[in-house]
Image (spheres, helix red, strand yellow):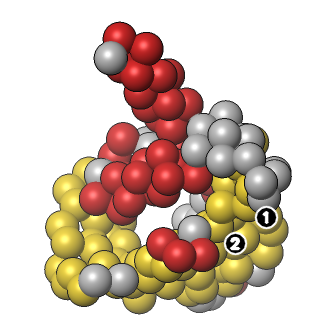
Amino acid sequence: MLVNSYRRLVHAQAGTIWKVLLDSVENPQHYLHGVGAVQILERLPAEVVREMTWEGKTVRERITLDADHGEMKSELLEHPLYTGHTVTHLVPTAVQSPVAPVYVETLVNLERKSLHLAQLVRTEDELVADMEEELQAVKMKAEELEKEDAVKGSRA
């Protein structure tokens, strides 16, 4: 079982980071290597079911979005090796300052379906590296968007 949390400090406003997280739902290939085809199977106001090919395997997940609380939950519906979920949420560093940095924190709770598949399963270190890479990509994109918005604002 892989139970852990990952955290990145992002120098961007929560609204900007949320937009990037929403983009990562629609375009995971921009944030996570090894993603092939992506298809949105169901779309509701606060929920998306998507299917994607990741490193040659089909992954289907239900992603629940709670913009009011800055939280995104991804529940694995179909994965050849794992069951479980991840929860990503935004944690402000200051309540009174909208421009204060924000932590993006992901809590992971995954379990192998079978220990007999151990030789086929990516190591936990590799999964951790992937999750950290995805958080870093979200951080970079959000901070880039903040800088672009600041430049546009100074020109206006």
Question: Residue 87 in the image: x percent, y percent?
Answer: 62, 74
**Badge 1 amino acid:** Ser
Question: Residue 140 in the image: x percent, y percent?
Answer: 55, 31
Q: Which mark is residue 5?
A: 1
Residue 4 falls left or right of residue 23: right
**Badge 2 amino acid:** Val
Q: Is residue 137 above or below residue 128?
A: above
Identify which residue is drawn at 72% across, 70% down. Answer: 107
Front residue of 118 and 156: 156
Question: Residue 123 in the image: x percent, y percent?
Answer: 69, 58
| Crowdedness near tag 2: few (<14), some (14–19) or many (≥20) residues, C-alpha within 10 Å | many
- Quadrant housing residue 56: bottom left
Identify which residue is drawn at 40% across, 22% down. Answer: 153
Residue on which disc 2 sits: 108
Residue 63 falls left or right of residue 83: left
**Would residue 23 be seen by someone viewing this image from the given angle?**
yes
Q: Secondary structure at mark 1?
A: strand
Front residue of 43 and 92: 92
Sooner in the amino-acid sequence: mark 2 or mark 1 = 1
Question: Residue 150 in the image: x percent, y percent?
Answer: 47, 22
Contact between marks 2 and 1 (CB within 8 A): the answer is yes
| Crowdedness near tag 1: few (<14), some (14–19) or many (≥20) residues, C-alpha within 10 Å | some
Identify which residue is drawn at 38% across, 59% down. Answer: 22
Q: Quadrant of the N terminus?
A: bottom right
